[in-house]
């Protein structure tokens, strides 16, 4: 019996060992390898965690995004790749004995499923609307499905030049645009961004501003940044009110001394460009700005006192450069010197008669004083000396249309100082035929100055500036009767350098 039992045990152990070897061979192992990259650009992703399920074995991708499971048991797996900032990726893999399975993960950033904002709807002004004000509120709306914070960008174009007005980083759905031009068609568009998806553009809507009121008054205001800015306006005699004020030049530029010419329908003015003062022209609404002078700029002692003149037909401009007087075509061609002072005194102001036969000039020394006013012909011959070697400040030259009268101002206090402060400046009317002078400022307030005088278009009045002589008070523009200086009327407050055409 013992012998039979041993034989049975040996046979049983042999069968068991045989079955065990067969089982190991059936399970077996294989290899899973692969790479983790960013979707779209295929940039390798380092340190992405790659996990096999259900075994839960995990490895991390190397600097080039590669990973390997070298001894994965045969079977079906779900392979996942995770990395902060990316959406988790999943791939299926089946391990076969002795084979290598390759898995590629193209991972999307975690915002990949974020939806973009809705297309902005332009609400106000209504598309195609007309007669809009020069300051206008634009209104639009857009929403975001995930309620992400939205940032807007505004672009406005027009139908008269290539300028594009852009406003970045608007967080509200309204924006007030100002300094639009009269009678222009504008095209506006809103671009919205959620900082995740590509920008979304609205449709392009249009509106048109109201018709130009053809303002007849032009003047200058000093802005808070100390730049001079040119404006136009009208004055309503019946209501004693100024109206339709329009800003013509920009706050970030220093521009002054506007002079309108009816024949050319252009406004000439002075503007600082490249540290020099030059003549420019513009349309009545402030657009189409063109530089006139280039090689010879405007120059003198006090640029705020310097003045120039149009020819009556609007084809040329007369201007000073230290002790010389030049004429130039309005397009910048034909520059010509026509006069030079013999004593080296500077020419600060000039005016040109309507028939172009006479030129009035104001000269002064390097301090701005020792001033004279004289008239010359186009050959430079002196015709008349209106004021000779005055002690106090003078200025404000303007011919009447018939060449018989000349306006100017003179500080009768004869005060002189380095700041060119005036104490008692009066408006005078000089008769070129009779060589007589009339003081028009007898009715002005004591302690104030009248200066920057011009004839009204019908020459029944003069327009001028009045300000306290303290040197810091705000100036204002007035008019008064040309014969006796009566009927002094306030036209525009906080304004200077007037022109009335």
Image (tube, rainbow, N blue to C red):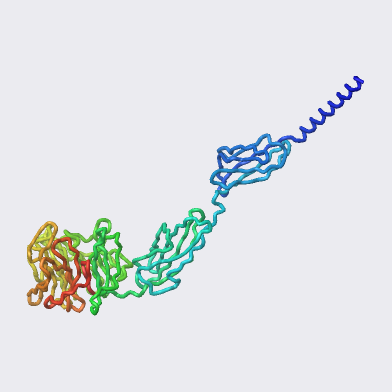
Please state which of residues 445 and 33 is positioned toward the viewer in this rendering.
445
Q: Is residue 403 visible?
A: yes
Residue 249 place in picture, x, y as percent:
29, 65
Residue 325 place in picture, x, y as percent:
18, 64
Q: Is residue 271 visible?
A: no
Please state which of residues 128 and 320 is positioned toward the viewer in this rendering.
128
**Residue 433: which quarter of the image?**
bottom left
Vertical placement of 125 versus 301: above or below?
below
Please state which of residues 480 and 498 is positioned toward the viewer in this rendering.
480
**Residue 62: which quarter of the image?**
top right
Vertical placement of 195 versus 184: above or below?
above
Please state which of residues 6 and 450 is positioned toward the viewer in this rendering.
6
Quadrant of the snapshot with the N terminus: top right
- Residue at image x 71%, y 38%? 99
- Count all numbered tags in the image, as a single digit: 0
**Residue 115: which quarter of the image?**
bottom right
Quadrant of the snapshot with the C terminus: bottom left
- Residue at image x 77%, y 35%? 26
Vertical placement of 192 versus 398: above or below?
above
Which residue is most to the front?
Answer: 1
Residue 290 place in picture, x, y as percent:
30, 65
Residue 138 place in picture, x, y as percent:
41, 66
For residue 436, side relative to residue 263 (left or right): left
Which residue is most to the top?
Answer: 2
């Amino acid at each position: 019996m013992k012998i039979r039992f041993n034989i049975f045990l040996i046979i049983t152990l042999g069968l068991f060992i045989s079955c065990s070897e067969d089982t190991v061979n059936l399970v077996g192992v294989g290899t899973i390898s692969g790479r983790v990259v960013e979707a779209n650009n295929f940039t390798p992703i380092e340190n992405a965690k790659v996990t096999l399920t259900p075994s839960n074995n995990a490895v991390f991708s190397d600097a080039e995004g590669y990973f390997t499971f070298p001894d994965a048991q045969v079977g079906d797996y779900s392979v996942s790749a995770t990395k902060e900032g990316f959406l988790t990726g999943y791939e299926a893999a089946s391990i076969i004995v002795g084979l290598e399975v390759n898995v590629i993960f193209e991972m999307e950033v975690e915002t990949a499923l974020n939806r973009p904002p809705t297309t902005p709807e332009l609400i106000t002004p209504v598309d195609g609307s007309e007669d809009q004000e020069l300051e206008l509120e634009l209104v639009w709306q857009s929403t975001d499905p995930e309620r992400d914070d939205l940032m807007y960008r505004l672009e406005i174009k027009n139908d008269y030049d290539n300028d594009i007005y852009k406003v970045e980083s608007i967080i509200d759905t309204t924006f007030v645009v100002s300094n639009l031009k009269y009678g222009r068609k504008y095209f506006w568009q809103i671009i919205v961004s959620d900082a995740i998806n590509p920008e979304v553009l609205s449709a392009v809507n249009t509106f048109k501003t109201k018709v130009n009121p053809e303002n007849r008054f032009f003047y200058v205001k000093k802005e808070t940044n100390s730049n001079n800015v040119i404006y136009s306006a009208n004055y309503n005699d019946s209501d004693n009110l100024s109206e339709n004020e329009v800003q013509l030049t920009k706050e970030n530029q220093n521009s002054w001394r506007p002079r309108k010419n009816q024949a050319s329908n252009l406004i000439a003015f002075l503007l600082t460009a490249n540290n020099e003062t030059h003549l420019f022209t513009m349309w009545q609404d402030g657009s189409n700005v063109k530089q006139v002078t280039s090689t010879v700029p405007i120059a003198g002692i006090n640029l705020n006192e310097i003045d120039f003149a149009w020819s009556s037909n609007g084809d040329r401009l007369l201007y000073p450069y230290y002790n010389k007087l030049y004429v130039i075509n309005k397009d910048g061609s034909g520059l010509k010197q026509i006069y030079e002072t013999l004593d080296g005194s500077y020419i600060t102001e000039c005016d040109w008669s309507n028939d172009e036969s006479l030129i009035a000039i104001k000269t002064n020394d390097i301090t701005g004083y020792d001033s004279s006013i004289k008239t010359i012909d186009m050959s430079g011959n002196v015709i008349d000396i209106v004021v000779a070697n005055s002690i106090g400040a003078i200025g404000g030259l303007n011919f009447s249309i018939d060449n018989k009268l000349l306006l100017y101002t003179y500080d009768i206090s004869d005060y002189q100082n380095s700041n060119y402060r005036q104490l008692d400046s009066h408006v005078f009317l000089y008769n070129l035929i009779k060589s007589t002078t009339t003081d028009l400022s007898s009715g002005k307030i004591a302690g104030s100055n009248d200066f920057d005088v011009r004839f009204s278009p019908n020459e029944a009045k003069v327009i001028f500036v009045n300000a306290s002589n303290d040197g810091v008070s705000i100036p204002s523009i007035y008019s008064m009767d040309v014969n006796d200086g009566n009927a002094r009327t306030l036209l525009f407050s906080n304004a200077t350098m007037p022109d009335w055409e």
